[in-house]
Amino acid sequence: LSEKPAPAREVKVIRRKLNGYVGFANLPKQWHRKSIRRGFNLNVMVVGESGLGKSTLMNTLFNRNLYSASSAAIPATEKPSAVEIESLSADIEENGVRLHLTIIDTPGFGDAINNTDSWTSIVSDINNRFDTYLEAESKVTRNTIADTRVHALIYFIEPTGHSLKPLDITFMKQVHGKVNLVPVIAKSDTMTEEEIVEFKQRINDDIITHNINIFKPAQFENDDDDTILSTQDLIAKIPFAVVGSTTAVTTADDRQVRGRSYPWGVIEVDNEEHCDFVRLRDLLVRNFLEELRERTGNVLYENYRTEKLKKMGIDQDNSVFREFDPNLKQEEEKVLHEAKLAKMEAEMKTVFQQKVSEKEKKLQMSESELFARHKEMKDKLLKQVKVLEEKKSQLEKSKTTTGDGSLQPAQKTRKGFLR
Ligand code: GTP
C-alpha cells in the first residue's frame, strides 16, 4: 500500500561567469545610502525596581543625559503608587548616521508592598503599541507608519546573588512572547567575579526551568569566524552583568575612563574584562539593532496580530488567490448563474399561481352571479305560470256559469292574451 516517495529532483546550478558588469553588486551601497537618508529608530523599554541604575545605564549607553534633571532622583516618599509609563525621545547622530531613540521607563515597578499586578500596565502598554501599529497598517494611506513598538526590553535584576525573585519570573513570563527580553544584572560592581558567575548560572537555570524566552542573537553559517566567535561569546555572557556611570574617573595608570572608583581600584564601564556593558551595547546598538527590530516586526508583532485578528473572528482571506485560479472562478460563476436561474423560476411560479387564483376567483364570482340570475328568472316564470293558471281556472269557471256556449268577454280577453 505504501507508495515509494518520488526521487528528489536534482537541481543543477549552472555557474557562469558574467560577460560584463551587471551592477547588482552595487545593491548594498544603494541600501546603505537609503538607510543613512532615512535614519534608524530604536525603542527600548527599561523595567526594574527603583534605584537599580536604569537611568544611569541608559545615559551611559548613549553617552548623553537622556533623563532630565527633574526625573533623576525621586525621593521614596514621592514615588508613584502604581507603575507609570514614561517615554523619553532623543535624536542622536554619530558620523552622519541618525538614530531616533525612545526610552520607555516604568517608574514604580516592584515598589508596592503587593506587586502581584506590577506588570499589568507594562503589558498593556506593549499591547497598545502593537494595536497602534496594526491600526496604522489597516488604514488606506499607510506610507509612513511611525513604529512605536518596543524593540527591546531591558529587565534589571537586583544583584542579590541568590536567584530570580517570584516577581522577576512572573514579569518575564508575562512579556517574553511580546518583546525581545534582555535581562541584565544591575550594579554588578557590588558583587565579586565569582559571585557573578554563580549568580548568572542560577538565573539561567531559572530561565530554563520556567521556559522563559530571552533574546539571543541568531548565528549564521556564512558569518565570518570572528563574527561567529564574538556572537558566541556574547550569548555565553547572558545575562549581562552591567555597570553604569557617565562620570570620568582616573585609573591607577592615569587614564580617564567612564567608571566607578573604589578604594581597591576602578571599575571601568567600557572594559570587557570588568563588566558586560560593552556586550550589552553591542547587542542593542552596534551589532544587533536591526535584528531586534526585525524580530519585533516579523515574529513578535506577527504573532500578536494573528492572535488579535483570530480573537476578532477574522480568518485568513484567500479570496485574492482564488481570483487567479480560472477553474475555481468558473465554478463559482456557474454556481452563481444556477442560483440566479432558480430564483427567476421561483419568481415566475409565484406570479403564475397568483394569476391562476385570481382567474379562479373571477370565475367563481361569475358562476354565482349566473346562479342568482337563473334563480331570479325561474322565480319570475313560476310567478307568471301561477298567474296564468289562476286566469285559466277563472275562465273555466265563467264558462261553466254562462253555459250557452257563446263567446264571453272573458274568452275574448283570453284570446287577445293568447294572440
Ligand atoms: P529610579 O529612577 O528611582 O527608578 O532609579 P534608577 O533605576 O533609574 O536608578 P538611577 O540610575 O537613578 O541610580 C540610582 C543610584 O544608583 C544612583 O546613585 C546611581 O549613581 C547609582 N548607580 C547607578 N548605576 C550604578 C551601578 O552600576 N553601580 C553602582 N554601584 N551604583 C550605580
Image (cartoon, grey):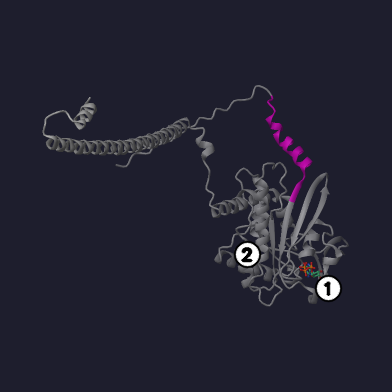
Q: Picture coordinates of residue 162 (x, y %)?
A: 64, 74
Give the residues drawn in magenta, as a range: 21-41
- Which image quadrant for residue 107? bottom right
Q: Quadrant of the N terminus?
A: top left
Left or right: 232 in relation to 385: right
Q: Which x, y percent locates residue 278?
A: 75, 57
The circle drawn on residue 172 is 2
72 to 364, vertically: above or below: below
Residue type at mark 2? Met
Where residue 41 sits in the image (x, y, percent)?
75, 49
Q: Which mark is residue 239?
A: none
In this view, 379 is above or below 69: above
Q: Is mark 2 within 8 Å of ligand 1?
A: no
Q: Nearer the viewer, residue 302 or 316?
A: 316
Q: Is residue 44 above or below residue 322?
A: below
410 sits to left or right of 275: left
Mark 1 lies on residue? 263
Amino acid type at mark 1: Pro
250, 124: nearer the viewer: 124
Q: CA distance from mark 2 to mark 1?
A: 36 Å
Marks 2 and 1, the one that precedes in the sequence? 2
Which residue occupies the foreground of this view, 386 or 147? 386
How packed mark 1 is, by other alpha carbons closer than 10 Å (few <14, some 14-19, many 20 or more), is few
Q: Quadrant of ligand 1?
A: bottom right
Question: Is residue 64 at all visible to an observer of this figure?
Answer: yes
